[in-house]
Amino acid sequence: MQQYLALCQRIIDEGIWIENQRTGKRCLTVINADLTYDVSNNQFPLITTRKSFWKAAIAEFLGYIRGYDNAADFRKLGAKTWDANANENAVWLANPHRKGPDDMGRVYGVQGRAWRKPNGEHLDQLRKIVNNLSQGIDDRGEIMTFYNPGEFDLGCLRPCMHTHTFSLLGDTLYLTSYQRSADVPLGLNFNQVQVFTFLALMAQITGKKPGLAYHKIVNAHIYEDQLELMRDVQLKREPFPLPQLEINPDIKTFEDLETWVTLDDFKVEGYQCHEGIKYPFSV
């Protein structure tokens, strides 16, 4: 929580105003931010200085793990986060590669589970990582990336949090996640939840101990219409202790994640928070 608040204050104190072409708004921006989450002690990084919603974040990442490419499948899991990009993005609606309503194209989990080789075959990046880690193997390349510039035109959105690297030291598993862009007041906590949960799940299904999760952000920003709420409201509040994430211990294999796991298999214990803040969202 203190890391998050320190980043917010750093942006306010040191940020440079940058015009964002996509949204037509200015962003107060800093380059390079590093956050660390203690998964080993289950210090779940859920924001406490405003109400934060964690379920959609986990549901979305579960869809990535399954390689979903349709917003309807994400909705069934409990995440509506892809509805607008799949169905309201004018550029994507005019894209000849779009298959129809709710189609997202080759984004995020599709790349992670079915990266297309030059010969037309598919490479399952995540399956390789799970297989190696389950055998105690770290080849220094336990990397899953969603960032495929050669196929940007085949999807509705290029990824923000784009690459995840797992590292195994003895029987302890670590994760380093890379994010090119972060809307700090509104979107960042969503990504924090996902980084933490990804390491916790991968450690559980590979029989390892979770260690630390490292979250590297390149461009961290606050939009101009969010600044007053962050500076004058959220940063004035005292944070509460971090809650804990409880994951169903019956989740034991990669196949479990691919088939029967739902949001009912995740619970947050001890979450105290201040009232919500309605930050403007920039599409």
Image: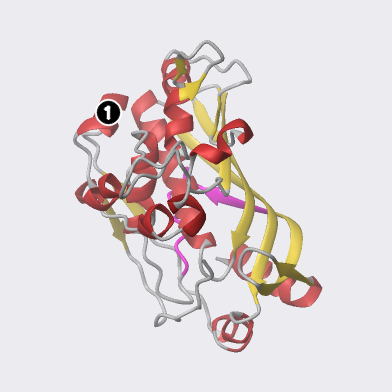
Count of residue discs: 1
- Depicted 222 relative to depicted 145: above or below: below
Residue at 46% x, 20% y is 133
Given residues 251 and 278, the one toward you in this image is: 278
- Depicted 103 relative to depicted 93: above or below: above
Given residues 6 and 38, the one toward you in this image is: 6
Q: What amino acid type is highlighted by mark number 1?
A: Lys
Q: Quadrant of residue 250?
A: top left
Structural crowding at the residue carrying mark 1, measured as other residues with C-alpha within 10 Å and reported as few (<14), some (14–19) or many (≥20): some
> Residue 125, image x and y in percent?
48, 23
> Residue 212, image x and y in percent?
55, 42
For the N terminus, give its image quadrant: bottom right
Residue 45 falls within the magenta-colored stretch = yes
> Residue 270, image x and y in percent?
33, 65
In the image, taking residue 95 as reference, residue 74 lies left or right, namely left
In the image, taking residue 252 as reference, residue 182 lies left or right, namely right
Residue at 65% x, 72% y is 24
Residue 183 falls within the magenta-colored stretch = no
Query: Which secondary structure dominates the residues rendered in magenta?
Result: loop
- Depicted 215 relative to depicted 146: above or below: below
Q: Which residue is at the far top?
A: 119
Q: Quadrant of residue 69?
A: top left
- Which type of secondary structure does the marked residue at label 1 adopt? loop
> Residue 96, image x and y in percent?
45, 41
Residue at 45% x, 76% y is 50
Residue at 55% x, 45% y is 159
In the rendered image, which residue does mark 1 sit on? 252
Q: Which residues are magenta?
A: 34-47
